[in-house]
Amino acid sequence: MNFGGTYNFQGDEILSATLDIAGIFDPYGIADGLNAALQWNNGDVSGAAISVAGLVPYLGDLAKAGKVKKDLGVINNAIEAANKSLGNKFSNARKMTPKEINQFFGDKEWHDKNINKKSMINKFRKELKGSTNADMYIDRETKQIFLKGNKSNAWVDTGEVLQ
């Protein structure tokens, strides 16, 4: 999984860490069993053995105790990398000018009608986290279009690009 910049994680590494931690709370051993198979498949025989030991209630969790700190670190690093990647995604954005918004919607009356913008905000209502109005931003280089909720300050990548 590439989060941009110098942060790269393999999906199996994140999945394995998540399964290790889930295995502590899983009373049926499903997470430990899946993790053992995953690690075995990836050639990590000692990791697979520890996950198999995790199948034994309570005692198995003690066997995994040494891995939990590392696993939490893997998950934390993945979250931090994702957050940094998202932060960088919007760092090059600036508020769109009325001319750019007109060009984007192809309608000189866009501001009076406001229909197109409201339709776009409605489309991303969930992602805007309660904001019923948003400002439109554009990436200076890629020309990607973003919305920034006025109430929530949540950023949304619309998937649109100004042509």
Image: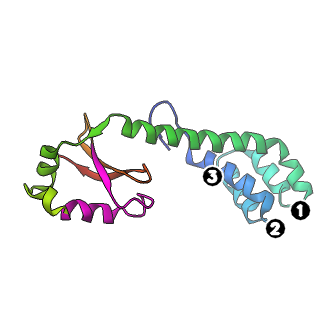
Q: Which residue is mark 2?
A: 27
Q: In this picture, which residue range is highlighted in magenta?
A: 115-137
Mark 1 residue type: Pro
93 over 124 or under it: above or below = above
Q: Earlier in the sequence, mark 2 or mark 1?
A: 2
Q: Secondary structure at mark 2?
A: loop
Label 2: how many Cα within 10 Å (few below 14, some 14–19, many 20+):
few
How far apart in space, not on screen, are marks 3 and 1 (Cα)? Answer: 21 Å
Q: Secondary structure at mark 1?
A: loop
49 over 92 or under it: above or below = below
Label 1: how many Cα within 10 Å (few below 14, some 14–19, many 20+):
some
Q: Is residue 163 visible?
A: no
Mark 3 residue type: Leu
Mark 2 residue type: Pro
Q: Which residue is mark 1?
A: 57
Residue at position x 9%, y 55% in the image: 106
How far apart in space, not on screen, are marks 2 and 1 (Cα)? Answer: 8 Å
Q: Which residue is mark 3?
A: 15
Q: Secondary structure at mark 3?
A: helix
Residue 68 in percent (x, y) is at 77, 45
Query: Is the C-beta separation of discs 3 and 1 under 8 Å?
Result: no
Looking at the image, residue 64 sits to the left or right of residue 125; the answer is right
Residue 101 in percent (x, y) is at 17, 49
Residue at position x 79%, y 61% in the image: 25
